[in-house]
């Protein structure tokens, strides 16, 4: 797999309003997502969860848009 490491700003521009599965994630000191490699992207969050079984390591699921008011985020 040959994915490009992108900053969070580049990711938001390239994949607006999409759910993303990222690998090789880099975090700030306070655990904010700074960069990663997009391996799966979709408008449908379920597609990302289905793809999770194919990846391991430093992963992140990220939504590159405004979080909808009816969505609950749990850490």
Image: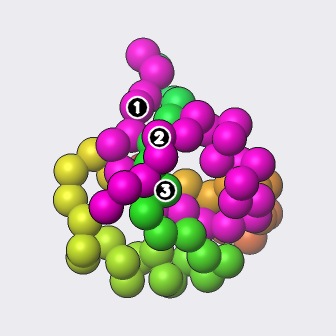
Mark 3 and mark 2 residues within 8 Å of each other at the beta carbon: no
When the figure is inspected, residue 4 is found, relative to residue 72, above or below; the finding is above
- Which quadrant does the N terminus fall into? bottom left
Callout in the foreground (1, 2): 2
Q: Are marks 1 and 2 in contact (CB under 8 Å)?
A: yes
Percent coordinates x, y for residue 68 in the rendering: 77, 64
Q: Position of residue 26 (x, y in %)?
A: 40, 31
At 67% from the left and 77% from the top, the residue drawn is 43
Q: CA distance from mark 1 to mark 2?
A: 10 Å
Rendered location of residue 17, percent (x, y): 75, 64
Could you say whether the residue bearing mark 1 is in a helix, strand or loop?
strand
Q: Taking 1 as reference, is 39 left or right?
A: right
Which residue in the protein does label 3 denote? Answer: 38
- The residue that appears at 39% across and 40% down in the rendered structure is 25
Image height of 59 relative to 30, above or below: below
In this view, the mark in front (1 or 3): 3
Residue 63 drawn above or below residue 58: below
Neighbour class for label 1 at 10 Å: few (<14), some, many (≥20)?
A: many
Q: Which residue is situated farthest in the left direction here?
A: 56
Q: What is the distance, in whole Å, between disc 1 and disc 3 at their CAs?
A: 12 Å
> Residue 44's quadrant in the figure?
bottom right
On the image, numbered disc 2 is attached to which residue?
A: 5
Report the residue marked by disc 1: 26
Q: Is residue 38 left or right of residue 1?
A: right
Which region shows up in magenta? 1-29
Q: Residue at x 32, y 72 (%)?
A: 52
Quadrant housing residue 63 = bottom right
Q: If you read the primary sequence from the N terminus, does the residue marked by circle 1 or circle 3 appear first?
A: 1
- 63 left or right of 67 in image: left
Callout 3 secondary element: strand
């Amino acid at each position: 797999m040959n994915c490009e490491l992108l900053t969070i700003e580049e990711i938001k521009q390239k994949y607006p309003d999409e759910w993303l599965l990222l690998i090789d994630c880099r975090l700030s000191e306070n655990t904010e997502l700074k960069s990663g490699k997009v391996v799966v992207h979709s408008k449908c969050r379920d597609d990302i969860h289905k793809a999770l079984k194919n990846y391991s390591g430093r992963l992140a699921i990220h939504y590159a848009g405004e979080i909808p008011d009816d969505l609950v985020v749990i850490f």
